[in-house]
Image (cartoon, rainbow, N blue to C red):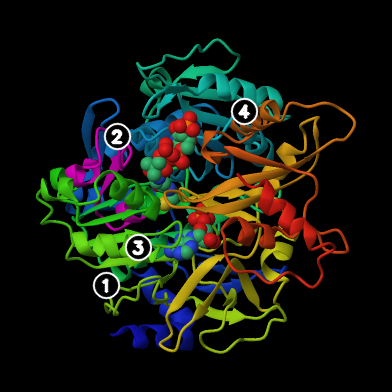
Amino acid sequence: MNYQQELDASKNDPEGFWKEKSEDLKWFQPPQKVLTQDEEGIHHWFADGEMNTAYMALDYHVENGRADQAALIYDSPVTNTKKTYSYRELRDEVAQTAGMLKDLGVEKGDRVIVYMPMIPQAAVAMLACARIGAIHSVVFGGFAAPELAVRIDDASPKVILSASCGIEIKRVIEYKPLIDNAIKIAKHTPKNVVVYQRPEAVADLSQDGDLDWVEVVSKAKAAPCTPVKGTDLLYILYTSGTTGKPKGVVRENGGHAVAMKYSMSAIYDMKPGEVFWSASDVGWVVGHSYIVYAPLLQGCTTVFFEGKPIMTPDAGAFWRVISDYKVKALFTAPTAFRAIKKEDPNGDFIKQYDLSSLKTLFAAGERLDPPTYEWLNEQFDLPIIDHWWQTETGWAISANMLGIEKMPIKPGSSTVPVPGFNVSILDDNGQEVAANQQGNIAIKLPLPPSCLTTVWGDMDRFKAGYLETFPGYYVSGDGGYIDDDGYLFVMGRTDDVINVSGHRLSTGEMEEIIGTHPAVAECAVIGRNDNLKGQMPLGFAILKSGAEFDQADIKQALVQLMREKIGAVACYKDTVIVERLPKTRSGKILRKTLRQLVDGEDYVVPSTIDDPAILDEIQQALP
Ligand code: COA
Ligand code: AMP
């Protein structure tokens, strides 16, 4: 089949198409109902299938000839550790950890928060939850205590699984004080906090319910796989929306497993036994899908890397890992490639390693900007594939389907819709626009398997945020266009979400935080272009009148506040103090115009602006 035939098959008979794909996995009871709609009108896949994701990802392979094959390779330049887990070893460790969770009273449907650095126990924790039908919610280790607290309250976990510390390039981050603080802030109190002790910073486990991971797991008995329905939840993953409250994206077991498995062959062209490396973090969706679940469901070996593209120890880190483990495909964020390019513009490190195993480079998390694409293209005689997706979908919406038919690459485009996603470009009235015209990127319902079916505990928010803008469509929050050849160009968010180093952040949340500073009367935060990180937040603040404030102190205090409330990953470094902000006559801040002004783009002064002179004032105030 070529791409067009595959796409047509997915459109003409979605149920038949996905039923056939589901047969590539070992179900306890294969689904009879492929696509159903609930009383809210929401579509679900594989409702009556019985399965277990951890079984499909581990036990199945152990039982079918892969027991001694490497399942996971842990490589940690920050601790000088390398360790390989075979499928059997990983299955056994997961089963025993699942037994520990059972001993702690975790049952099917209970939530477990996983707040961990990039150590193999993080994957073990996720799979152990899956094994007993518990719902994991991984919280990125770079988030500060208040972010963790919001997630504790929203997911109400029975248990938190964690480690004593994470290791950044220049510092060790102790997790336990952050967790204790988060539990203090939160209304909900988990029954237990289980901590994997690392020698770099051993945690004090003296709070009620604190447990030592190794100790409790060693006492546990291996737990069998609990059968779950295709529509039972595998995980909740929080992502930034436009307000301070993150959205709990939910993922159902059945659709997820089918989409993951399909994507490994159709998009990534990976066969069982081959080595796949997603250089991301388990705290993000890329880590969920392509460090943990998809490679294992496909019977591949996944690389679990605790390091950075640079400085661990140098800009050759990625190439060293690829040559050490014969990686066939690398997937990372463009920001990582930009960081490497900055340190090693001539690709000297690339030449030092045997990269003959490498067949493709994949990028996502933000647009692969043409200059970075061109640099990669000069360095490698390989397909450099940009593909576009979101936490909400769990896998690519548009990509170059290498396993089906490699399409010509157009720099700046994420190529074509993945079969299952009916992508349309709509104007603000919901009408389809012509080719090459920019608009809102929307996906015609039903969404394919793996996509979110609600926001955890908040169906109204799911409907209002995604389904009601354009009836019959899911609205992605991204803008872009489709060209004459059907190629999709994703040009950026249409809402207040920004993308910093491939990390999705909410400027609305940052504004809420700045607004809590006693000196600030009003503020706005925008994402400005950044050559390395893609975007960086920039704040504008109007100070309260009548009081004397030291501007430098306030700017410093806001940086500190952002680190304490969101975490260092927010990369909040600058605030511009202004007298006024550009607004419409009805009082809405013109953030888009602000951003265009800061980025030096041409802009049209909005006809609704209250006073155009403010734009000159802002221009003067910029550093
Ligand atoms: N735990 C604690 N802190 C973390 C963290 C974590 N897991 N991850 C990042 N941080 C901190 C960093 O230490 C840094 O702190 P600092 O301001 O005190 O120096 C801050 O958050 C900003 O981090 P980052 O934006 O990642 O910048 P960096 O300069 O440390 O590294 C890159 C730059 C490009 C090397 C890095 O961003 C990178 O590897 N990006 C890839 C992103 C990625 O994988 N995204 C996932 C989507 S595919
Ligand atoms: P996240 O949910 O954290 O994966 O972030 C999803 C958002 O990142 C998308 O809505 C886009 O704005 C952006 N994004 C991810 N991949 C790409 C890509 N290949 N091209 C353009 N934008 C992307």
Instruction: Provide the residue designation for mark 3.
Output: 371
Q: Earlier in the sequence, mark 3 or mark 4?
A: 3
Numbered label attached to residue 98: none
State left or right for residue 99 relative to residue 569. left
Distance CA(mark 2)–CA(mark 4) = 25 Å
Do labels 3 and 4 touch, CB within 8 Å? no
- Residue for point 63% across, 49% down: 506
Which residue is labeled 2 in the image? 311
CB under 8 Å between callouts 2 and 4? no
Q: Which mark is residue 403?
A: 1
Q: Position of residue 371 (x, y in %)?
A: 35, 63
Please determine whether, in this image, residue 419 is positioned above or below residue 335. below
Marks 3 and 2, how far apart at CA: 23 Å
Labels 4 and 1: the sequence-earlier one: 1
Q: Residue at x 21, y 42 (%)?
A: 316
Q: Nearer the viewer, mark 3 or mark 4?
A: 3
The amino acid beneath tag 2 is: Met
Q: Nearer the viewer, mark 2 or mark 1?
A: 2
Look at the image and say whether residue 211 sits in the magenta stretch: no
Percent position of residue 472, x then y = 66, 79
Counting other residues with Cα less than 10 Å from the Cα at mark 1, is it few (<14), some (14-19), or many (20 or more)? some
- Distance CA(mark 2)–CA(mark 1): 34 Å
Amino acid, disc 3: Pro
- Which residue position holds label 4? 560
- Alpha carbon distance from label 4 to label 1: 47 Å
Q: Which residues are magenta?
A: 294-321
Contact between labelled residues 2 and 3, with CB atoms less than 8 Å apart: no
**499 left or right of 404 in image:** right
SS state under label 1 = loop
Q: Would you call the spot at circle 2 few (<14 residues within 10 Å), some (14-19), or many (20 or more)?
A: some
Which element carries disc 2, helix, strand or loop?
loop
